[in-house]
Amino acid sequence: MGCKRFACAVCALVMVLASLPFFGCSSSAPEQKPSISVGVAIYNGDDTFISNMMQSLTEIATKYEQDTGIRVYVNLTDAQENQTNQNKQIDRFVSMNYDVLCVNLVDRTDASYTIDRAMDADIPVVFFNREPVQEDLQKWDRVYYVGTDPAENGRLEGQIVVDAYRADPARFDKNGDGIVQYIIIEGEIRHQDAMIRTEVSVQTLKDAGIELEKLDGGIASWVRSQAAALSDQYFEKYGDQIELIICNNDDMALGVIDTVERRGLSFNNIVGIDGTPAGLAAVEQGKMLGTVVIDYAAQAKLIFDLASALAVDGDPGAVTTIGADRTVRAPMYVVKADFIP
Ligand code: GAL
């Protein structure tokens, strides 16, 4: 929904690019570009976290226009989870000679199509949120990735549970067996964040000396309704045995809360990641233990700073620190329910 509203805002921003003065600009063009064109390709406009981030990106672009006097044309496309659609969208941006591409890949292992087209046309690329493999990122020195460190996401998520456990172990041990029976609800199957978040959050609990037993787990692809359906099956099957539900993101944690409420249960040993507005509200209302806030506005700012520097031929290293692995890591922090110290 957010993204559709955003897409309309973008439509208003986007002009017929072919008719812009900077297209096919001649040698008499002024040194400072009067405008820049940014092609943004997202994997799925229905994804809450991505649509929030895109909303921030447009606001940042507008502020940049006001601050610099450089006009920014942002064109946002939604691949609707289809890499072939996204490749066509990339082709279009390249054929219209956009200044820079910002790409949220559908399939993170399929970055080479975009990189090869961009290299041929000498258009820099900022990938974000879905991290290409190193081999692809190292193909060209005008390719970057902006995202958070998934291991740190998982560590912080695990630490929320550790803090809650230390404050009140009994909350996680309804059956008094000294072991926390847990369920894990994961994002997409081949998404690096999902795999690493799962592994590291669970490991963080183990490292803190908490005894664990996995009751069950499944994939809900970041989607609230899928997590609601999956957790409904788990509550049906395991009932009171469930002592903790770890979710790879907030939307899925909210799906679990939907089920908890629909079933009239009093269960809030649920954790998430993202810090979406709805996720933060659930933490504040004590419906979940906490969330790891991936500051989407800060991430959008990093993406835009990098993209605009590249588009105006600036030095991207001057706007942010770029690792040898060609990645830029966005900040994150934890928000816990107020009953956890
Ligand atoms: C993750 C985020 C998820 C989902 C996913 C899409 O970083 O936590 O909510 O947006 O990216 O790639």
Image (tube, grey):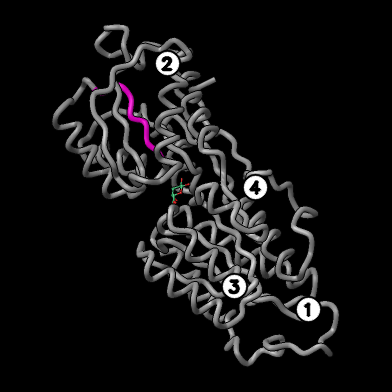
| Label 4 to label 2: alpha-carbon separation | 30 Å
Expressed as whole percent of the image width and height from the top left, the position of residue 311 reads: 71, 70
> In which image quadrant can residue 124 be found?
bottom right
User: For the residue marked with disc 4, what is the amino acid?
Assistant: Val
**1 or 2: tag closer to the N-terminus:** 1
Instruction: Give the total of numbered labels.
Output: 4
Query: Disc 2 designates what residue?
Result: 206
State yes or no: Cβ of the residue under disc 1 lies below 8 Å from any atom of ligand 1. Answer: no
Q: Nearer the viewer, residue 109 or 56?
A: 109
| Label 1 to label 4: alpha-carbon separation | 26 Å
Work out whether 154 lies above or below 41: above
Expressed as whole percent of the image width and height from the top left, the position of residue 212 reads: 33, 16
Query: Disc 3 designates what residue?
Result: 120
Magenta stretch bounds: 242-248
User: For the residue marked with disc 1, what is the amino acid?
Assistant: Lys
Q: Which of pointers 3 and 2 indicates the residue nearer the eye?
A: 3
Instruction: Report the disc number at residue 257.
Output: none
Expressed as whole percent of the image width and height from the top left, the position of residue 65 reads: 73, 72
Q: Is residue 247 magenta-colored?
A: yes
Query: Disc 4 designates what residue?
Result: 328
Expressed as whole percent of the image width and height from the top left, the position of residue 221 reads: 33, 48
Query: Disc 1 designates what residue?
Result: 33
> In which image quadrant can residue 313 be found?
bottom right
Secondary structure under the numbered disc 4 in the rendered image? strand
User: For the residue marked with disc 3, what is the amino acid?
Assistant: Asp
Secondary structure under the numbered disc 2 in the rendered image? helix
**4 or 2: tag closer to the N-terminus:** 2
Which image quarter holds the N terminus?
bottom left
